[in-house]
Image: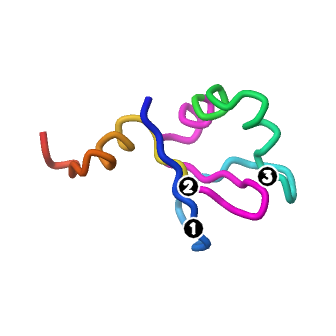
C-alpha cells in the first residue's frame, strides 16, 4: 500500500479526523504499531484522513489514491 503524508497549517474541511488525545494527538497509537495504525485508519476513515501529531496536523493519502497522485495520474486516465 503506497502512502504519503502532507503536513500543512491550513485546516482541511470535509476530511475525516482520527480522534486523539489533547497535545499528543495520535502519537502513542502510531508509535506502538505504525503499519497497523495506518491500515486501521485506512479501513475506518478511507484513503484520505487527518491525524494529529505533537505541534502539527497531518493529512494522509493512502492506497490506490496515493499511488495515482504520486504517479501524476488523473482519475480519468487508464
Residue visible at 36% across and 42% down in the picture:
65
| Relative side of 24 to 76, left or right | right
Mark 1 — residue?
8
> Magenta includes 48?
yes
Q: Secondary structure at mark 1?
A: loop
Count residues near mark 1 (Cα–Cα under 10 Å), then give few for <14, some for 14-19, many for 20+: few
Residue visible at 34% across and 40% down in the picture:
67
Mark 2 — residue?
59
Q: Relative to residue 71, is residue 37 depicted above or below? A: above
- CA–CA distance between discs 1 and 2? 8 Å
Q: Nearer the viewer, mark 3 or mark 1?
A: 1
Q: Earlier in the sequence, mark 1 or mark 2?
A: 1
- Residue 27, percent across and down? 78, 45
Label 2 near label 1: C-beta < 8 Å?
Answer: yes
Q: Earlier in the sequence, mark 3 or mark 2?
A: 3
- CA–CA distance between discs 3 and 2? 13 Å
Q: Which mark is residue 39?
A: none
Mark 3 — residue?
25
What span is colored magenta in the figure? 40-58
- Residue 3, percent across and down? 47, 40
Residue visible at 42% across and 35% down in the picture:
2
Residue 59: quarter of image? bottom right
Amino acid at each position: 500500500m503506497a502512502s504519503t503524508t502532507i503536513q500543512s497549517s491550513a485546516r482541511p474541511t470535509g476530511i475525516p479526523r482520527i480522534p486523539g488525545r489533547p497535545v499528543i494527538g495520535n502519537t502513542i497509537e502510531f508509535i506502538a504499531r505504525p503499519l497497523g495504525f495506518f491500515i486501521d485508519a485506512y479501513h475506518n476513515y478511507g484513503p484520505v484522513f487527518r491525524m494529529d501529531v505533537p505541534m502539527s496536523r497531518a493529512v494522509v493519502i493512502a492506497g490506490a489514491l496515493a499511488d495515482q497522485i504520486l504517479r501524476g495520474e488523473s482519475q480519468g486516465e487508464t
